[in-house]
Every structure is written in C-alpha cells, then in structure tokens.
Image (spheres, rainbow, N blue to C red):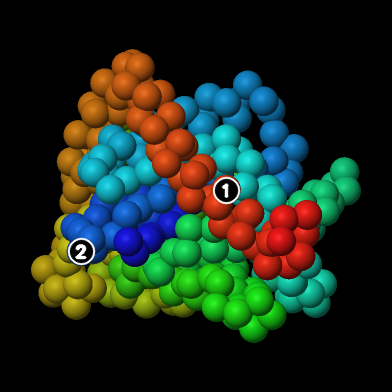
Amino acid sequence: MKHIVSGIQPTGSLNIGTYLGSIRNFVKLQESYPEHHFFLFIADLHAITVPRDRIALRKTIKELAALYLACGLKREKLSLFVQSEIPAHSQMAYLLQCFTYMGELERMTQYKEKSQRQVAGVASSLFTYPVLMAGDILLYDAEYVPVGEDQKQHLELTRDIAMRVNKRVGEFFTVPKPLIPKVGARIMSLIEPDKKMSKSDDYIKSRILLLDDEVIIRKRIMSAVTDSDQTIRFDKSEKPGISNLMTIYGAITNTSIETIEKQFETTSYQDFKKAVADVVVAELKPIQERYQAIIASDDLDRFLDEGSAYAARIAAKKVAKLNHKLGLGRKR
Ligand code: AMP
Ligand code: TRP
C-alpha cells in the first residue's frame, strides 16, 4: 500500500495559516488519493527542541488531535497518532544521523532562524531536528509528504538522506516527494504581512486561531494592516497586506487571484475585508462545532490508540531491518 505522511507540531494554538497550508490540504488529499494510507501525527518530539511548559504541551497535543478530526479528515485509511508514543521515531533519527553531514544541517534556514532566538543556549536537538523529521517520513516509506513551503528544504534533505542510505545498503527507503499547495502555501501575519503567520508570534493580533470566536475573527481581519492605495490587486512586494487577504479568500473559496481581482475591482478595502471575514467565519464555524464534540468524548483517545498501534508495528519493523542491514546487534 502507498503511504502519505505528515506531522504538525503541538505548539501554540492552531491558526488559519497551519489550517490552510496544511490540515485542509490533508482533507483534500484524502479525496485525491483514495488508495493511499495516511499517517498523520502530532510532532511532540519536535516541539521540545525548544523549552516547553509541560502542562501547556500536553493540552495542545490533545487539542491538535481533536482539531485534525474536526477539520474533516475521514477515519478510514488514516492512522492519527502522537509521535513520542512510537519509540521507532527516536531510534530512526539516531540511525539517520549517521548518514547526515554537519554541513547539511548548518545550511537549514529554519535552524539558522530558530537558533538565533534561543538566549539560554541552543539544544543540539534543534540542530538535528531535520533528521528526526526525515525519520518520521522514511519510517513509513512515504510516497508523498504534504507540507507548507517552509518545510521544502527539510524535504530535500530527507530525499538526500534516503538516497544515501539506499546507496549504502541497497534499495531500502522510498524517496518521498513533497506536496506543496499552490494557493495558501504561505499565509502571512495580519500585522506584519512580510512575515509568516505563526503560532509562536508574540503578537496575538497577527493571527486568527481556528478556535477564535466570530467577534474576534472579524476584529482581527478588519484591523489587518494594508496599504493606502485602495485597489484590490495582488502584489506581494508592494501590497503584501491586501495580497495576503486575497490569498486567504482565494484558498477558502477556491477562487483564483485573477477572479478575485475582477470580482472586487470596485470594492473598498473595508468591504473586501468584510467579505474575507465572512468566508473565514463560515469556514471555521462547523470546525469549531465538531471540535467541541470530539474533545468532550473518549472516542478520540481510542482512535489515537488504534493509530499508534498500527503505525508502531510498521515503524518498529523498519528500524529492525535497518539495524540489521547496518550490522548492528547479533542476529545474522
Ligand atoms: P507548524 O505549525 O510549524 O508545525 O507547521 C505545520 C504545517 O503547517 C507545516 O507544513 C507548515 O508548513 C504549515 N504552516 C505553518 N504556518 C503556516 C502559514 N502561515 N502558512 C502556510 N502554511 C503554514
Ligand atoms: N517540521 C514540521 C513543521 O515544523 C513538522 C513535521 C515533523 C513534519 N515531522 C514531519 C512534517 C514529517 C511532515 C513530515 O512544520
């Protein structure tokens, strides 16, 4: 069976950037790839590469799991699980570190950015993070990996590592391909539209959370930073704010940028923002309702247990096989 693998870190609360760039794409992919089995997980091991409060982390893991399902993922052919519950993820990361060069990791843009923000010292796991990610993917021989634009470099490294291992031990890993959505691949901050909308941004007004209520959503969109030009035209460098709102509108309504430009040719920024707020509210309402039902039932834990058990079997076998191929242990 062919596999699709992806993960999201349980950090902060989910915002529409992660939703449009990632989770919603998973929902669509389940329709486009009905024969593939999906392994979607909560990347909690990745989250602790920087210090986290344990109470908040535990809460977010559960919330994220509920949100995955609330966003409309179908349960057939889906293993949803928490990464740290499967030891093979850490084990594979170590094995792959033996196939990854320092220079490759030093080039990772996300590492360069994130390490600068760590005042109390940079954990070595932040440096080796892309290798853990490569393991997440290669353990399941993923054919495709749906991610946002910002993860492209990590995917390229994963492919290089896979090919290197294959060269050493013979065909062993499937070399994965990234699936990056064209529209909505990068949703920007509402306040500083030249920066990505991020769960970790200190500025709460920069984002819309999936669980924000309608009043807040409208307020955030109405106060989004734009320019003084007043024409609704897509221009990322000159008009990043309005372009970002157009991207959000287009991603939710499946409308092309050209169509949006025509449709809102004579509309004021104020009215366009209202239109954006309307579609965001309409998109999020049913998700929020389903979320409340899911988080309140034990069914979620049962589903995560099943997902974990299924994935763990596959993952453990892959690690055992690679150990053997590398000459580790006593088994001949
Ligand atoms: P993270 O929330 O950083 O763990 O990212 C989870 C997934 O969502 C990754 O595939 C990211 O590329 C994607 N993602 C995160 N933030 C955004 C954003 N502002 N716009 C589009 N995609 C995003
Ligand atoms: N590093 C990814 C992010 O921050 C999350 C992630 C971890 C991931 N492991 C993965 C995504 C494996 C895809 C496949 O967004």
Q: Quadrant of the C terminus?
A: bottom right
Q: Tell me how far mark 2 sits from mark 1, CA to CA.
A: 29 Å
Horizontally, is 268 left or right of 204 in the view? left
All told, the count of numbered labels is 2
Horizontally, is 88 left or right of 6 in the view? right
- Which is more toward the observer, 291 or 231? 291
Circle 2 — which element?
Answer: helix
**Residue that label 2 marks:** 32
Q: If you read the primary sequence from the N terminus, does the residue marked by circle 2 or circle 1 appear first?
A: 2
Q: Can residue 147 be seen by looking at this rendering?
A: no
Mark drawn on residue 53: none
Estimate the x, y position of residue 263 in percent, counting from the top left. Answer: 11, 68
Q: Quadrant of the N terminus?
A: bottom left
- Which is more toward the observer, 202 or 320? 320
Residue with the most extreme right position: 121
Horizontally, is 175 left or right of 228 in the view? right
Residue with the most extreme bottom position: 167
* Residue 234 against residue 297 in the figure, above or below: below
Circle 1 — which element?
Answer: helix
Residue occupying image coordinates x 26% and y 21%: 293
